[in-house]
Image (cartoon, grey):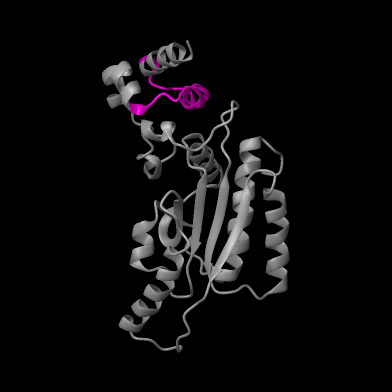
Amino acid sequence: MCKKIALFVAEVAGIIGFALVDCERTFSTVLWKTNLTLDNFQKNAGPKINSYVHKPVDNFVDNLLISHLLCTDKITLEGKSELNIKLVVVGKLKEKYFKQGIAEYAKRLSRFCKFQIIEVPDEKAPESLSQAEMDDVMAKEGSRILAKIKDREYVYALAILGKERSSEAFAKEIADLTTYGHSDITFVIGGSLGLSKEVLDRADTQISFGKFTLPHQLMRLVLTEQIYRAFMINEGSPYHK
């Protein structure tokens, strides 16, 4: 009976094009609860599945196809998955005032997700470097970063040439990612020279906070606050005015 209901939901959802997020969340929940496989869904839903492509915020999520609705992450009846948000950063944070600010937002985030910051050692180098030497430093730091990232993680790389977002657009991205099965989201902040090509290639999207040059230590605080703000926006909280 449950599988018949799931197939009925699949057919109806295919007809209306999965227009409503709430419908999509319910649909993914039903599929997981009934152990309905993608093959069975494709067989019964027919060609409608092939015409569905999700376009939520911008092209960074264009690859969130129907397969993400059928992820293996456990989803509760309310449609929420266990969410892990991680920052992988280069170098140790020494300034006490930055630590205090990050700790405050990390505490606030604890009711929304498991939040953690992983520091990897920076590569010691002289002030003046050739391009080859800079590439070598970034490659070594990059390999340390990649060692902390698992295949299942959705990765944001902070890069000056990345896409700028408003706080509202960023909040919607986070909501869309969690809705479509991404329960592990990782943000990467490189060292003073930036991120290696290998890290940028691994990233699912690049994000920029503008053309200002900011200390990387300060960016940890700014990013942590923006992640918290995203949850406040999605909750409809007056925190974001």
Q: Is residue 135 left or right of residue 149?
A: left
Q: Is residue 162 left or right of residue 83?
A: left
Instruction: Report which quarter residue 6 is drawn in.
Output: top left
Residue 34 shown in magenta? yes
Instruction: Report the magenta residues as a range.
Output: 15-38
Q: Residue at x 61, y 37 (%)?
A: 234
x%, y% of residue 47?
Answer: 26, 20
Q: Is residue 240 left or right of residue 206?
A: right
x%, y% of residue 171?
Answer: 55, 42
Q: Is residue 208 above or below residue 165?
A: below
x%, y% of residue 180?
Answer: 46, 35
x%, y% of residue 2?
Answer: 48, 14
Visible residue check, residue 48: yes
Q: Residue at x 33, y 22 (%)?
A: 40
Please state, as top left, top right, bottom left or bottom right, where the C terminus lies in the image: top right
Visible residue check, residue 194: no
